[in-house]
Image (cartoon, coloured by chain):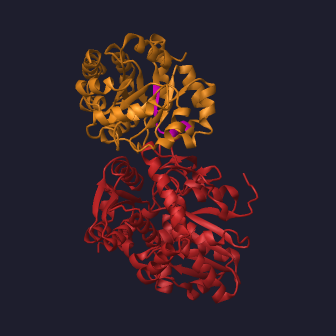
Amino acid sequence: MTTKITDYHAYPDARGHFGPYGGRFASETLMDALEELSAMYKRMKDDPDFRREFDEDLAHYVGRPSPLYFARRLSKNWGGADVYLKREDLNHTGAHKINNTIGQALLAKHGGKPRVIAETGAGQHGVASATVAARLGLKCVVYMGAEDVERQKLNVYRMRLLGAEVVPVTSGSKTLKDAMNEAMRDWVTNIDDTYYIIGTAAGPDPYPTLVRDFNSVIGREARRQMLEQAGELPDALVACVGGGSNAIGLFWEFLNDESVQIYGVEAAGRGLNGNEHAAPLTKGRPGVLHGNRTYIMANEDGQIMGTHSVSAGLDYPGVGPEHAWLKDSGRAQYVAATDDEALDAFRELTRTEGIMPALESSHAIAYAKKLAKEMGPGKRIVVNLSGRGDKDVHTIAAIDGLSV
Amino acid sequence: MSRIASTFTRLKDQGRKALIPFVTAGDPRPDVTLPLMHALVSAGADIIELGMPFSDPMADGPAIQLANERALEAGMTLRKTLDVVKVFRETNTETPVVLMGYLNPVEWMGYDTFIDTASKSGVDGLLLVDMPPEEGEQLVPKLRAAELDLIYLVTPTTTEERFDAICKQSTGWIYYVSLKGITGANTLNVDDVAKRVERIGQHTDLPICVGFGIKDGETAANVSRVSDGVIVGSALVRIVEELQSASAVEISSQVSKLLGDMRTAMDRA
């Protein structure tokens, strides 16, 4: 299906639909809370006081704008297009996730909710949520798959130091999707005093829009910075896609710039043949999960499948509905990078530029390498370096057969 | 008249309230479900709610989550669930069967295939936890055409403005969820339930049945006094959990015992 779309900024529609995707597939108990949140956000997003509060937090607490860095040595080594890195890894807490949690915590505060909950996979969104909760004096509970609790001990302890309660989730596959189920269950039960900070651009409407809008600062800055540095728009954008929040944050500002090619990179895990990957846009088909219609990975009976990626942040069987829509409309291309390609990219960027990327972001670097060669010299690519790699050092060491 | 409507009419004539047990299809094993359904009817079930297993039952508490996991682990599928109903209908043409679950397996099978198979198997209605009236555009007309009832939930957080939209789209009955929360949670407050049921009744002529938090005969009796029927799920599913390695006969007999207590208490009320 390819329809000619004149304004990509006109989505979602009034009911939260991106073409056939998105929507509000939620249980009845949540419907009123979602409607209230939607109404509150519509009021607040154009409110000058709210905008100022958000912008000031981004400037003075998060440390924005994040640099757009021309990776000279890397580009030269690759011998193709010039590669620019959007340094979200330099944000407070080390990833783009904080942009969204700052915004949503402000909504919780204005909505008068004293308690926030969040789901987390690798722990980055959990840490970002615990961070803003500590700062605003909100009680914070983070749901995390029991397997991820084991894999990401450092982040678990960080959250606890920040005053959050971390609840290991033992149901289902004990990973991110199950943490999200459990957070939904908590929210349904404690809806009167609780705000649910969803960490990715998925979930029932209005979450995909909230998360996108709060992260769209990435693309706004990158567009301005590119024009300042090169006097022209980039030729291509590359970002990794799990749920897709950093990707939509980079892409959004450029969606109506027809000359800019857009690439989302999913996790191909141990390869796209078989089931050991996390690439619903590449290998899945449309279905309904976690409150929205989107591309998902399920077996022939419609049961959600376990996924695999070396990076916990991409290890999710669904994807934000706007990406589903951008795929179908042809505006963005979705590709995939394997565990091994991502690991190679991690090492290459670390050694070449002295920048250690998160394993999630390493997927984007891996694809950018192919693309830079394809596009050739004289072209410019912006890669979203969505997070820093400190949290992954243990994983890399384990792969190297070391324990640190 | 649909099988569900005529059941409520008969109950009304008899001055009785509906007792609606919920069990997850395929829990703990696919072969248990058919004998269990017949046993439920013998123990006094007026309608059966059969859970369609799903890997990610977001609105369910631990008891029904585990039931879903056991069923899927034992190889249950949506197709096999429909098959069970088909075989059940060979010997029972009176007791309505409503399938309850989540949208994805239905969507994955395809609305047309699902509805066609469900109709032919003798399914009477559908309750989809994660498909509110706002998202029913494609599915609802197809269900209407096939004369399958579509039951919606109303909860303590449903606003009065939503009552009308929900009541207008509902057929069969209105399922009032007595608690904020997931299945199998806490204890309900009968006075609150009575007030809400009365308010909902101002928007609809459909029967209003109450579920979530009904654990024993006494609660069932108290709730049935202020509504048109009760739905009991987690309390039964917990018995299945305890007896998961037992025979179908043993499971059926223990589940029937609790359901029978509820029936007796309700009929006395």
Task: Specify the colour of chain A.
Answer: red
Instruction: Judge by depth and name the residue closer to the eye, A395 or B104.
Output: B104
Residue depicted at x 42% and y 42%: B55
Residue depicted at x 26% and y 15%: B268
Give percent across and percent down for residue A309: 46, 60
B73 lies above or below A340: above
Using the rendered image of the protein, determine whether residue A356 is visible from the camera's viewpoint. no
Using the rendered image of the protein, determine whether residue B250 is visible from the camera's viewpoint. yes
Res B17 → quadrant = top left
- The magenta-colored residue range is B98-106
Task: Specify the colour of chain B.
Answer: orange
Give percent across and percent down for residue A258: 73, 70
Instruction: Judge by depth and name the residue closer to the eye, B137 or B249.
Output: B137
A72 lies above or below A198: below
* Count of marks, rendered view: 0
User: Is B28 placed left or right of B116 in the picture?
Assistant: left
Residue depicted at x 29% and y 61%: A166
Instruction: Judge by depth and name the residue closer to the eye, A308 or B89.
Output: B89
User: Is residue B100 on the magenta stretch?
Assistant: yes
Give percent across and percent down for residue B128: 49, 36
Residue depicted at x 53% and y 54%: A205
User: Is residue A235 on the magenta stretch?
Assistant: no
Give percent across and percent down for residue B119: 57, 22
User: Is B252 placed left or right of B13 in the picture?
Assistant: left
Res B191 → quadrant = top left
**Quarter of the N terminus of chain B within the rendering:** top right
**Quarter of the C terminus of chain B within the rendering:** top left
